[in-house]
């Protein structure tokens, strides 16, 4: 006679636990979504309401903002959370609708695009210098002091 274990009984064979990536992806989407709402509304408030509105956003405005390390960290956090949030959403769509080799190709392309955009965006934010040394004065913005 064959017996079947109760559904919730512990397994007799010890299995190695795996990381549940879908669960962590789901949790990331919820947590990053909440943080993104706060960051985006803060970004919009500072850029559109505290100053002279959208007409004041130009190279000098961005250069002045990125001269402060707080805004570099703020914008980098916004970039990383938004890009990974969007890539995770695209990963979910690809997993839902694509099959076999085509799915793998799309996931690899998505990972490559995400890594490239994160790298380029982070480099732009962290290495930005509106007044590089050795640049001719006629090419520099008006707010750069000429020595």
Image (tube, grey):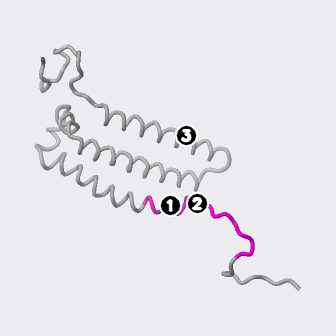
In this view, 65 is above or below 134: below
Q: Which residue is mark 3?
A: 109
Task: Give the x, y percent position of residue 121.
Answer: 37, 37
Let me know if residue 147 is in the magenta part: no
Task: Give the x, y percent position of residue 26.
Answer: 48, 62
Calculate the distance from the C-alpha at mark 3 to the C-alpha at mark 2: 23 Å
Dot 3 or dot 2: first in sequence order is 2
Mark 1 Cα-neighbour bin, 10 Å: few <14, some 14–19, many ≥20: few
Q: Nearer the viewer, residue 12 or 98?
A: 12
Mark 2 Cα-neighbour bin, 10 Å: few <14, some 14–19, many ≥20: few
Mark 3 Cα-neighbour bin, 10 Å: few <14, some 14–19, many ≥20: few
- Magenta range is 11-29
Residue 20: quadrant of the picture: bottom right
Mark identifier at residue 4: none
Task: Give the x, y percent position of residue 141.
Answer: 16, 23
Calculate the distance from the C-alpha at mark 1 to the C-alpha at mark 2: 9 Å
């Amino acid at each position: 006679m064959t017996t079947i274990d109760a559904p919730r009984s512990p397994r007799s064979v010890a299995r190695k636990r795996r990381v549940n990536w879908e669960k962590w992806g789901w949790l990331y989407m919820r947590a990053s979504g909440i943080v993104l709402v706060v960051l985006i509304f803060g970004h919009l408030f500072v850029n559109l309401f505290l100053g002279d509105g959208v007409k004041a956003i130009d190279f000098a405005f961005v250069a002045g903002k990125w001269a402060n390390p707080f805004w570099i960290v703020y914008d980098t956090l916004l970039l990383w959370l938004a890009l990974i949030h969007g890539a995770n959403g695209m990963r979910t769509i690809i997993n839902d609708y694509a099959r076999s080799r085509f799915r793998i190709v799309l996931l690899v392309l998505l990972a490559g695009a995400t890594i490239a955009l994160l790298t380029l965006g982070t480099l732009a934010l962290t290495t930005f210098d509106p007044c590089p040394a050795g640049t001719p004065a006629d090419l520099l913005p008006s707010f750069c002091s000429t020595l």
